[in-house]
Structure formats: C-alpha cells, structure tokens
Image: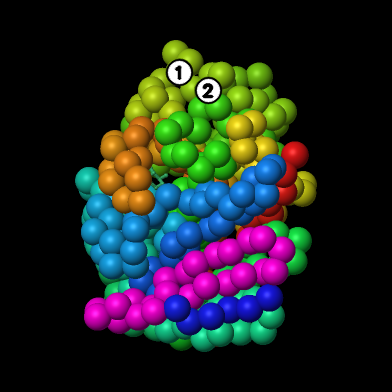
Amino acid sequence: METKFISKTDTGIELYRLENGNGMIAEIITYGARIHKLLVPDRTGKLIDVVAGFDDPEGYRNDRGTYFNATIGRVGNRIKNGKFVLNGKEYVLYKNDGNNHLHGGKEGFDKKLWTAEIGEGTSLKLSYFSKDGEEGYPANMRVSVTYSLTEGNALNIAYQAECDEDTLCSLTNHAYFNLSGDFKTVLDHDIFIDADTLTAVDGELIPKGEILNVKGTPFDFTVPKQLGKDIKADEPMLINARGGYDFNYVLNGGEPAASAYSHSSGIKMTVVTDRPCLQFYTGNFLDGFVGKTSYPYQSAFCMETQGYPNACNVADFPSAVLKAGEKYETSTSYVFETV
Ligand code: BGC
C-alpha cells in the first residue's frame, strides 16, 4: 500500500504511482488530474492496462478533444448555446463545441496543472484554484480530486469544491475503458446500467428536458446486455450520436449504478456513485487517434458519473448551482474483480 512520486517533465507535469498491494496500480498525472494508467489483474493474474491514454505524461498536451481520463470541470458535458442565467445575470461561456460549451471550455480542468499531495493510505489529492471569470463562469473556486485505491481493488475518486459566489459545478472523470485491454472494440463487453430512463437529446446531443423511458428499447441496459447487440439499431438518437451511445442515463439509485464485463479478460468493473446520472459514451468520436496504441471508433467506453447535463438551461432538471460557502462533495468508485 503506497503512493510514490515517479517523475516530473520539463513543463512540470508530475507522475505518481499508487499501488494497493493486491495487484492493482494506478498512475496519475497532475496535467488535468488524469489517470495515466490503471493496471488491473485479469483472470490469469496478468496485469492489464484498462484505460486509454498516451505513452508518457507530455502526450496528454496533444489530446485533441478526447479528454482521455481527465478530471472535467467546472461543468461536465454540454451547455446549450454556451450561456446561462444565474441570480438574474446572464453568463457567456467559451464555445468549444460548435455553438455550445463542452466539458469546461477552451481550457477546462482537463488542461490545468494541478498540485499534488500524497495522502493517507494509498491516495493522492490534487488541487486547483479556478479564478473568477475562468471560461466565463462566475466565482473563485477551490477544487480538489482525491484518487485512492482500496485493498478490494477499487479506484475511488472523491471530489470537493467551494466557491466565494454562486456558480455552477458538476465534476466528472472522463476515463476511457476497455476491459480486455486490447482497445480494438468494446462491442463485445456486457453492459449494465441501473437506469429506467435517460435524458433525450437534440441533434447536438444536448438534453432538452424530455425524459425517455428506456425499458425494452435499444437504450435499455437494465439487464446486462452485450454492447453490440442494439448499437446499430435504426434509431435516430443512436444514428445521430455517430452510431453509438452518448447519452445521460438517470440512475435509479441502486448499487451498483452500472457495470461492464469483458469475457476475454474476465475483468468486471462495477461503478458505485452518489451522483444522480451517468453519461454512457461508446467512443463514437474516436477515429484511430494514436496514443499508447491506436484507438479506433468504439474501442473504448466511458461511464461518466455526473449531474443532469445542461441543467442550467432546463428548469425541470435538478440544479447544478454551487452556492457561495457551500461544500460540493461527491464520490465515484470503479471496482474491479475477475469473474
Ligand atoms: C461526450 C461526447 C464527447 C466526448 C469527448 C463525452 O462526454 O458525451 O459527446 O464527444 O465526451 O469529448
């Protein structure tokens, strides 16, 4: 059980290694508070890196829109037209996704250098101070993300934030998983999501308020299902999302929230969270992007736990407002076992 400083690049990116003494290793970098590697034993005991990424820490500076395993903030997912009204004032955000704001803007938390501090047990705390007006958001905000490994092969991610004026906050991690470790396809994985509904999206993949019942539809993962089974269904929302899933599931609140399983490695990942929603994204925008290997279309999936996307523009969605002086505290665990 230990956390070790490994290296620092010329531009200041630090790399740390967390080892839980039970075969699991996580490598974390300070650029974007990202997971660089996540090594998990397969059914033969061999360590498999189950996250996508680049060969070395500097590589992440060349991330062109994948957000590989990054901490996302201030607000995950899209904000329609890059604006919102808070306390009677309109705020205009940076538009980095057509006419919309995505994953924190031009230089979101995924592109910041965080300050690392080795913590208790096998943990690493990363902190960042986001200034009033950054990317168009109001308020100064202190934010931290603590990664820890448990003996039971779980990677816990705990988020904390505080601000000095009301602002928006909805943090997540954008890990790209392939539990076989070969990053060729994830269509052979079995997927479970404990959600009876999802937030329907418009042509720009933005929830507009309508809640869709998924039971019996191609969007249904309430019973574990092979990912490839319905992904090519003749269904406008799937086709519009470049032939795959890229939707916000509203979690039923049970435990676990979701799981994924690779028959070839025997690795099962279970997601436990206190967040209300989960963005299930099947790498539909991956296009042979080269990192540790080449990442083709649908070679990895993300299970991004989050608040309701675009909540600031949909009156019926639970709010993403973080009030001045209030504490934002959430956590998500990715638990690994072999089956
Ligand atoms: C979004 C996708 C987006 C991807 C990478 C995901 O969270 O849902 O639409 O393409 O992030 O930017």
Other residues around mark 1 within 10 Å, as few (<14) / some (14–19) / many (≥20):
some
The quadrant where residue 42 appears? top right
**Mark 2 crowd level (few <14, some 14–19, many ≥20, 10 Å Cα):** some
Circle 2 sits in a helix, a strand or a loop, which is it? loop
Q: Amino acid at mark 2?
A: Gly
Q: Nearer the viewer, residue 51 or 113?
A: 51
The front one of 331 and 263 is 263
Q: Is residue 21 left or right of residue 169?
A: right
Q: In the image as oriented, which residue stretches furthest toward the top?
A: 234
* Residue 96 falls in image quadrant: bottom left
- C-alpha gap between disc 1 and disc 2: 8 Å
* Residue 290 image point, x, y percent: 28, 46
Q: How many marks?
A: 2
Q: Are marks 1 and 2 in contact (CB under 8 Å)?
A: yes
The residue depicted at 68 percent of the width and 54 percent of the height is 335
Can the viewer see residue 329 in this picture? no
Q: Can you tell which mark lies on residue 232?
A: 1
For the rendered model, the colour scheme is: rainbow
Does 46 sit above or below residue 5? above
The residue beneath circle 2 is 228
Q: Please tell me the numbered disc located at residue 12.
A: none
